[in-house]
Amino acid sequence: MNAQTILKTLQTAKFTRSLKQAHLEKLAGMAFQATYREGDILYREGELGDVLYIIEQGHVAVETHIPGQGRVTILTVGPGQLLGWSAFFQNKRKTASCRAVTNVRAVAISTPQLREACQNDYEFGYEIVLRIADLIADRLKATRLHLMDIFAQAQP
């Protein structure tokens, strides 16, 4: 995946599509291609990470361990969506595990570089933090609803 392909993916991804062109180019400069085969683990719950992923192609299951239930898929992320937001926050551990449901191609963005860019360009940083906060709020809501369904089904 070359710089132009990465930029095109960023221009169309839900997380980044309305960013200014200069901000998209800044992100593209800290990005690289990541590919995974079906069944591969992108990362595990509790690990530290140093990249965010924007899925270009394929689907990834976001999974968590629920005592008495085992591994449960709480969300499936697909093309245009961001994955791995906790890596943006330095020394924060992953809140879930992620497994490729299909073959996956993604744009991976270095979070140390992203944090530095956010500190050096407050307008850029503000846009990124707002988007991450919005994503976290949406994921928490979706996870809560999904977990309520799981626990309701577990009731005798």
Image (spheres, grey):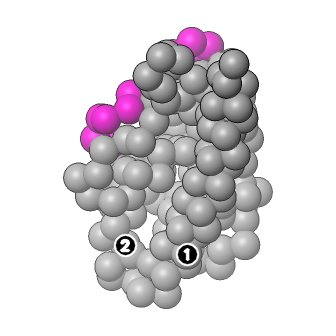
Numbered badge on residue 117: 2
Label 1: which residue? 130
Toward the viewer: 5 or 60? 60
User: Residue at position x 70%, y 46% from top?
Assistant: 145
Q: Position of residue 103 (x, y in %)?
A: 66, 19
Q: Which three-letter amino acid code belongs to the residue tagged 2?
A: Ala
Sooner in the amino-acid sequence: mark 1 or mark 2: 2
Magenta span includes 41: yes
User: Residue at position x 41%, y 42% from top?
Assistant: 95
Tag 2's secondary structure? helix
Numbered badge on residue 106: none
Q: How far apart are marks 1 and 2 (CA)?
A: 15 Å
Q: Where is residue 85 in the image (x, y as percent from the top left)?
A: 47, 52
Name the image quarter holding residue 112.
Answer: bottom left
Q: How many marks?
A: 2
Which portion, as a residue range, is magenta?
Answer: 37-49
- What is the residue that sits farthest to the left in this orientation? 91
Q: Which three-letter amino acid code belongs to the residue tagged 1?
A: Leu
Toward the viewer: 145 or 125? 145
Tag 1's secondary structure? helix
Toward the viewer: 20 or 150? 150
Magenta span includes 36: no
Q: Where is residue 52 in the image (x, y as percent from the top left)?
A: 47, 48
